[in-house]
Amino acid sequence: MSRQASRLARIQPLLCRMVPLAAVFCFLAWSAISIGSDFSWDDADPEVLNQAWRLARGESIYRGIDAPPYTFAAYTPVYYALAAILLKLTGLSFLPARALSFLAALSIGWALIHLSRAGDKTGQGGIWTAFFLFLVPAFLYNSTRSHVQMMAVAFSLWSLVFFLRDRWKETIIISPLLAALAFYTKQTQVALPLAITIYLAFKNRRWLVPYMTTLAVAGVIPFIWLQKITQGHFFLDTVLLANLPYNAFQAPQIFIHHAGPLLLFIGLAFFLSWRRFRQGTWGALDCYVMSVLAVTWISLGRVGAHGQYVLELVIATLLYLLRAAGLPAIKGREVLVSIQILVLLFYAPLFIFLEEGLWNISANRAAVKIYPILKAQPGPILSQQGSFALFARGEIFIQLFHFTALSRAGLWDQNRLLSEIERRAFAFVITEFPVEQPLLAENARERFTPEMIEALRRNYRRAHMIEPYHLYIPRSP
C-alpha cells in the first residue's frame, strides 16, 4: 500500500466521525435555501402541489386535457391525497407537502437503522448511514421537496424490511401491500416487486404465488376503482399522458451528473453483488440492488430526468453496503470509503451554495418582489415557474413542460394555447429566459414550442427583469 493510501486508511475513522456533523450542517443550510411556504424554483413542485390543492377543494385531478386549465396529475394518488388532507387544515402552502417528504426521508433512515440492528444488534451502522444520506445531493434535494419520489421510495424500503423478516404474514401480506402503496405513490416504483419476484422464483417458490396474489389484488382493485370514479382518466393521465419522449443517449450524462457523487459506492455495491451472483450465494438484497440499477438506468432516458430518478439507487446502494459489507467500516476497503466520504464532504457544500444555491437564492429573492406585482393586476398568468400562477391566482393555467411534450407528440393541440396568447388573454407571462433572444437554451425549448415563442414575441413586451425572471405584459393594440 502506498503512503498516501495508508494515510487515507488511517483517517477513515476520523472521516466517519465527521459525517453526522457535516450532514446536519448541510441539511440546515439546504433547508434555509429550499424551504418556503409560497415558492419553489423547481417547476415540478408547484405542479404537484397544484393537484393536491385541487383535490383538497374537491376537484378532479385525473381529467381530460381538452379544456383549461391544462393540467393533469402525472402520478398515482397516494401523495396527492395525503397532501390534500393537510392542505385542508393549513390552506395553500408548500410546507405540508414538504413535511411529508421530510417525514418520508426520516422513515428511510429509521428503516436503515432497523435493518442494521437485524445484523449487528446495535444499529450504529444504520444511524451513520442515515446521516450519510443527507450528504448525497440527490437525497438532500428531494428531502424537502413537494414531490412524490421520497414517499414512494420509503414505501418500497419498508416493503423490503417486512419481506426480509421472513415471516409469512409480513413477507407475503404486509410487504406486497407496501409495494402496492409505493406504486400508487409513483407508478414507476417497480424495482422492488420485480426483484422479490425473481428472488422467490429461484430461491423460495412456495411463497411466490401467495406474494404475487397479494400484490396483484392490491394493485388491481384500486386501479378498477380509480378508473371508474375518473371515467377512465386515471390510466390516461398516469400512463398515456405521463409517458414523455425517450432518449437513451442522455442516460449516461444524467447518471454521471446525479449519481456520480456516489459512484465509488455504487461501483462497489455492483462489484460485490455481481460476485455473489457468480458464486451462487446471492439473496434478495442482491436482486434488489441490481434491479434498481437496471430500472434507474432505463428511466434516465426519459426527457426531464433529474435527481429524483437516482434516489432509489442511492438508498439501495447504501442499504446493500450496510448489510452486505458492514458500512461504514468496510474491511479491506478503508481507502475507498475514505475517498467516497471526502468527495461528498467537499461536493455537498458546493452543491448547496454554488450548483443550486446561486440560482435558488436569486429566485427566492425575486419571488418576494414579483408577487406584489402580480397581485396588483388581475388576470390569468402564463408562467414557466408554476409557483407564481398557483399562489397569485390559486391555479396553474398550464403545465408547460408536459403540454409542450404532448404537443410535439401530437397528443395535444397547441392552438388552444396559441389562441390565448394571440388575443393577449394573459395579464402576465413569466419566463426564465428573454423571449426576444434568437437562440433558446434547452430548458426553454422543453417548455415552449417555436410557435409559442413567436406568438409571445408578437403579442407581449417585457415590463420587468427581476433576475432570474422576465415578466411580460400584453402589447398595446
Image: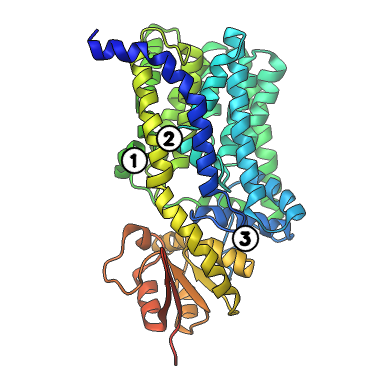
CB-based contact (under 8 Å), mark 2 and mark 3: no
Q: Name the residue type under label 1.
A: Ala
Q: Residue furthest left?
A: 2
Residue drawn at point x = 57 percent, y = 72 percent: 372
Q: Position of residue 22 (x, y in %)?
A: 48, 30
Residue 346 is at least partly visible in this image? yes
- Secondary structure, mark 2, is helix
CB-based contact (under 8 Å), mark 1 and mark 2: no
Residue hosting label 1? 251
Residue hosting label 2? 296
Residue drawn at point x = 68 percent, y = 33 percent: 217
Q: Position of residue 123 (x, y in %)?
A: 60, 14
Sequence order check, earlier mark of 1 and 2: 1
Q: Position of residue 295 (x, y in %)?
A: 44, 33
Q: Is 149 situated left or right of 103 in this image?
A: left
Identify which residue, 6 or 315, lies in the foreground. Answer: 6
Residue hosting label 3? 63
Sequence order check, earlier mark of 3 and 1: 3
- Secondary structure, mark 3, is loop
Q: Position of residue 344 (x, y in %)?
A: 39, 30
Cα separation, mark 1 vs mark 2, equals 9 Å
